[in-house]
Amino acid sequence: MDDEQYCISELLSPLFIFISHSLSLSLSPPPPLLLLPPLAPPPGSPSAPVTVSTNAHKVEVRENSDAVLSCTFRTEQDQYPRIEWKKKGKDVSFVYFDGHFKVPFKGRATIDGATVTLHRVTQEDAGEYRCEISAPLDSVSLGETNVTLKVLVPPQTPSCEIPSAAVTGSVVQLRCSDHQSIPPATYSWFKNNLPISPPRHANATYLINTHTGILEFTAVGKEDTGRYSCLASNGVGSPKMCEGKHMTIEDVNITAVVAAVLVVCLVVAACSCGGFLLRRNGFFSRHRGRSFWISQCHGAAHISSQTLHRTEDT
């Protein structure tokens, strides 16, 4: 009997060990989970990059006013992205970097979020600006948008070139220019404080170019005599006018022209006659030798250079 019990125990022992081990495994706490970092999205899969936009890609303001350069952004994860503003030119220069404005914007620019306001802008501030948002924690970490600033300048007093006098029938140009206004000024002319209308027919004696500021008379007449002035305007600020100047148109003086022609003819005739008389009297020798006139008390003796040479030889 003891041998049988021993054999049964030997047979059942491995079974008990397996059951007890299984029970211990089921009752023991599960092993801790191993957390792996998220896998990067495979190439070509959609991702959420930094998005940067602006309310206005083109901004136009008058000189000495404020200009708002809008920039808004949205990030995927990074809550504190880096904000930079740059200005394009011959070289790209920083406007806002590392939380501060750079010269020449320091002290006259403010920032709200990523939107920059430039105060008291001048023509030097005009140009193209770029807002850059850098978010290192995002899958696509850089975004940007561009804003072009145009500073409008009102007309300045134009420079006028008006001749004081001209001759009837001649071509005369009156010029007017303002090189500082933005956008470029257009021009209108006045005679005796009354506007000169653009010519309405092909055979008009004058032409007006409102863009170049040139008033051209193809053949001026005495009726064109008067005081002329020019007005420059560009829709920004008040128009400006140059100081008027009087232009006189005179007829050709026929008597003076005839007298001048007669004087010229007389001078030419006198020179011709004088040359003929001098040659006839031997002043201009027909030979190789030169002629000399030697003054004497009671007259003048003509001695040729050949005679002088013969005398010297003897």
Image: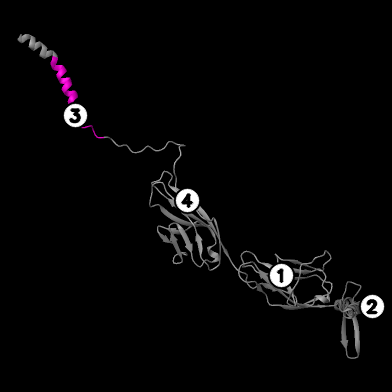
Q: CA distance from mark 3 to mark 1?
A: 102 Å
Which residue is drawn at the image coordinates 46% and 54% (left, top)?
A: 72
User: Circle 4: is it few (<14), some (14-19), or many (20+) Cα within 10 Å?
Assistant: some
* Segment tinted magenta in the rendering: 12-32
Type of amino acid under label 1: Ser
Of mark 4 and mark 1, the one earlier in the sequence is: 4
Type of amino acid under label 4: Val
Q: CA distance from mark 2 to mark 1?
A: 69 Å
- Report if the CB atoms under discs 2 and 3 are less than 8 Å apart: no
Q: Is residue 83 left or right of residue 30?
A: right
Secondary structure found at label 4: strand
Of mark 4 and mark 2, the one earlier in the sequence is: 4
Quick check: 90 above or below 222?
Answer: above
Residue under label 2, please give it.
280
User: Circle 3: is it few (<14), some (14-19), or many (20+) Cα within 10 Å?
Assistant: few
Does residue 19 show up magenta in the picture? yes
Of mark 4 and mark 3, the one earlier in the sequence is: 3
Secondary structure found at label 3: helix
The numbered mark at residue 188 is 1
Q: Is residue 127 left or right of residue 285?
A: left
Secondary structure found at label 1: strand
Quick check: 13 above or below 176?
Answer: above
For the residue pair 183 and 93, the one nearer the viewer reads as 183
Quick check: 50 above or below 262?
Answer: above
Q: Is residue 102 something that shows in the picture? A: no
The numbered mark at residue 52 is 4
Q: Position of residue 103 (x, y in %)?
A: 45, 64
Q: Nearer the viewer, mark 4 or mark 2?
A: 4
Dividing the picture into quarters, in which one does residue 150 lie?
bottom right
Of mark 2 and mark 1, the one earlier in the sequence is: 1
Of mark 3 and mark 1, the one earlier in the sequence is: 3
Dividing the picture into quarters, in which one does residue 113 lie?
bottom left
